[in-house]
Amino acid sequence: MAVVNLNFSSIQFDPQHPHIEGAVFSERRLSDLSGYFADEDAYRRCLQDGNPVLYRVYSLEQWTGEGDLAYGFGVLMPGKVGREYFFTKGHYHAWRPAAEVYIGLSGSGFMLLEDETTHESRLLSLTANSVVYVPGCTAHRTINVGSTPLTYIGVYPARAGHDYGSIERDNFRKVLIELNGEPHLMDRSAYLHQLQKGTA
Ligand code: PAN
Ligand code: ZN
């Protein structure tokens, strides 16, 4: 286990199991994301098969001064609900101007971004040795399209906070599904329509 001096810290970690002293640990299982996946029948079937851990987050948020930063390690498991890849809940920052930098450590995935005002979407690659800049006022979700855990670090202003409510209510306008073995981004409404018609 890594030891952290809260003010001057240099930590070494295992990306798959970044247990870090002082980090706040949270774990989301499939049941915590009820209503998030488009294919509700597939969601129910997955739940009946068990309630797998979708992701774990280890957050270091003990700095509270103006100008301070916080950061978190994410470990997002591989898998799908129906054709939709496992993802994080996604959120806006409570303090909307707060941007965030994501650094990919291992695995293969994407970040889905959505501008709060224009609703413009962006799908950006998040893999080992990649960096994604998430501007303020932008909802962000991490998606694992690989067969191994997707691990990453997110660095954000200490005062950013997390606002989950809007995404919980409205979700993202796009879904990332597997089509012919490849990730395919499409409108949620179109995918829901296909599911209703049974052509998905
Ligand atoms: C990340 C996220 C992490 C988990 O550290 O908190 O990827 O995603 P959810 O918070 O959406 O469940 C971050 O963006 N922090 O701001
Ligand atoms: Zn964030």
Image (spheres, rainbow, N blue to C red):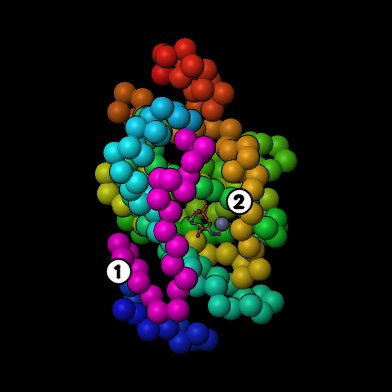
Circle 1 residues within 10 Å: few <14, some 14–19, many ≥20? few
- Determine the residue positioned at 30% across, 62% down: 16
In the depicted structure, whether residue 6 falls above or below residue 158: below
Q: Quadrant of the N terminus?
A: bottom left
Q: In the rendering, at what x and y percent does residue 4 appear?
A: 42, 83
Amino acid type for the residue under numbered disc 2: Tyr
Image check: 86 left or right of 192? left
Is the CB–ligand 1 distance for label 2 below 8 Å? yes
Which three-letter amino acid code belongs to the residue tagged 1? Asp
The magenta stretch is 14-37
Magenta includes 36? yes
Q: Comparing marks 2 and 1, which lies closer to the viewer?
A: 2
* Residue in the picture at 45% in, 62% down: 26
Query: Relative to 81, does residue 78 appear above or below in the rendering?
Result: below
Q: Could you tell me residue 86's position as x and y percent? A: 39, 42
User: Which quadrant of the figure contains the C terminus?
Assistant: top left
Q: Earlier in the sequence, mark 2 or mark 1?
A: 1
Whether residue 25 is visible here, answered yes or no, is yes
Q: CA distance from mark 2 to mark 1?
A: 28 Å
x and y percentages locating residue 196 in the rendered image: 49, 16
Which numbered disc covers residue 14?
1
Residue 130: numbered disc: none
Query: With 103 as the anchor, is 63 left or right in this view?
Result: right
